[in-house]
Image: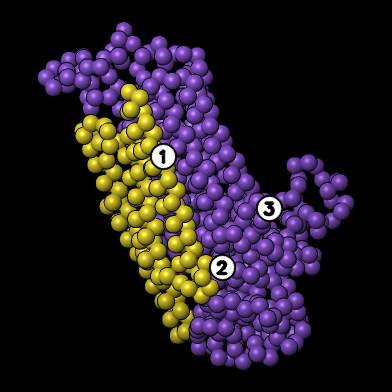
Amino acid sequence: MAHDFTTAKKIANKTIIILGVITIVEVMLTLTGKGYIIKGFHLPHVLISFLMIAGSLWKAYLIVFEFMHMKYEARGLMLSVLLPVGLLIWAIISFLYEGQAWKGNRDTVKEREKMEVAE
Amino acid sequence: MATDTLDKSHTDHSTTENGSWEGAAYPFKVGYGKLMIWYFLLSDAFTFAGFLIAYGTLRFSSDTWPVPDFVFSTFPFLGGNNPLLFVTLMTFVLLFSSYTMIRAVQEGHRENRKGVVKWMALTILGGLGFLGCQAWEWTTLISGEHMTVSTDPFGRHTEGGIYLGLNGEESDESFVEGDSYLIHRMDLSAHADPGHEDSGTGSHGEEGNIVAHPAQETESSLGEIEGTAAENNSSAGTLQSDSVGLHQEDSTVKQSVIAREQGAAGEGTSHSSGEQEATHDEHATQNNEHATKDDAHGTEDGHAAHHYPGPGDYPDAVVDENGYIHRKYIVASGENTGLIKSEAFGPKAFGALFFFITGFHGFHVFSGVIFLFIIMINVMSGIYIARRNKNEMVEKIGLYWHFVDLVWVFVFLVFYLI
């Protein structure tokens, strides 16, 4: 029992350090990408976003699997909680696509208004 | 009876193999409460995902969006120009409380009552610290930068330009496309008629003073000028040549030049109907999202907030009826080069999304603190020792608390990092 406790403590210590490091790296990266750290140096927004999402998913994994002990629960419990979350993947894709379409429509309308005034 | 069954959940897992659902077996080998908190958290995750996806959708549908490292760049006692520093601090406060929580759960597993109480008390401190940080962040945004649910003073330039000086001449302050700006707000009550406040009732307040000012039409009429000019590509050349001479003359002359532009540009369309005016106003708003960092948070009162007597159209800015100062500038790049425009508000949805989503998260933290407190008291009283289920209740509040941290990871990602 005492051994279990020390192992668990070690895992918790390790996890919190990794979480902190990821957070710091993320913040530094996003600020570097926007030119705050090195004057005049920018990174493409797509690359930054991709790295930020990857970092956040890693953090989410650590929190759920280590802090919330999902790793040590029954497989059925894990699947019944995690599989429904997969639905969000499609929700994100479709809604962001929809948002993009709104923007496209609005731009079209503006373009048409311009042409009408010019006539 | 209750203690009996709970006891079995941790000592006897073999019954799940054969006699499932006969009263002695536990699905997924966990107690009822713990299983259900997992499903509650699943549903809560969907709620938050819905909000964050709404944010993403609206952001994708807008031409511009406030830049997070510009909006969130203030820090207590240090002022502006510290992008993301404060929210990073908030993240670490929450991470710290997550760590103390896992330690409390571990102490709970080995039935160490004192340890549980100690680590839970630290967790509560972390939670309160986070709430305090959020209170400061909101206060800064609301009373310092005047962001409201429906007004977003943080904008972003869509074209390059040069700000106008006090007399409507070109100043040496210029900006490029993509720069951020903050629309400052003047205190209208300070400019109000001194006798007014004394005679007014308590409920009158600021609103009454604002309404008392006569110059409500100026904003929309300026929008009309801008809208008209923006839509008229064909006359852009003329407009440009007009405005070159413009900035050497005094403000009265400039006004008349603008009026002339309006007349020249407005040949094809009628501007008399209110409906038309509204459309143009909106158009101008969309064309107008721009930005410069230099006059951001640091100079809260810096930009001449004091020389406007009240709402109205001034040579270097338009002050709307709520006291927001929309600085004027000459467009220096793109198809509208030479036009004079005023800074427009940022996307309207930003304030509502920010306050609602971070507020909903903050509410989770707040209720989490309350439950942590209740459960800590129960741990002290020894009630969970009597249940002999290794402090499962501490584990449950732990799950909830880690989930709050998990949500913050994504709020942090969506609002601040990207």
The colour one sees for chain B in the rendered image is purple
Residue B368 visible in the displayed image: yes
Circle on res. A118: none
Q: Residue furthest right?
A: B195
| Mark 2 closeness class: few <14, some 14–19, many ≥20 residues within 10 Å | many
Q: Please report the residue visible at 60 percent of the width from the left and 71 percent of the height from the top.
A: B292
Q: Earlier in the sequence, mark 2 or mark 3?
A: 3
Residue B217 visible in the displayed image: no
Q: Give the quarter of the image for residue A107.
A: bottom left
| Amino acid at dot 2 | Ser
Of the 4 image quadrants, the one containing the C terminus of chain B is bottom left
Check contact, mark 1 vs mark 3: CB within 8 A: no
Which SS class for mark 2? Answer: strand
Which is closer to the viewer, label 2 or label 3?
Answer: 3
* Chain to which mark 3 belongs: B
Which SS class for mark 1? Answer: helix
* Chain to which mark 1 belongs: A
- Residue B76 in picture, x, y percent from top left: 65, 51
Query: Can you identify the residue that label 3 sits on?
Result: B77
Q: Can marks 2 and 3 be said to lie on one chain?
A: yes
- Residue B67 in picture, x, y percent from top left: 51, 63
| Amino acid at dot 3 | Phe
Q: Give the quarter of the image for residue B259.
A: bottom right
Q: Residue furthest front?
A: A3
Circle on res. A13: 1
Q: Can marks 1 and 2 be said to lie on one chain?
A: no
Q: Please report the residue visible at 62 percent of the width from the left and 72 percent of the height from the top.
A: B342
Which SS class for mark 3? Answer: loop
Cα distance, mark 1 to mark 2?
Answer: 40 Å
Q: Is residue A94 left or right of residue B23?
A: right
Q: Give the quarter of the image for residue B129.
A: top right
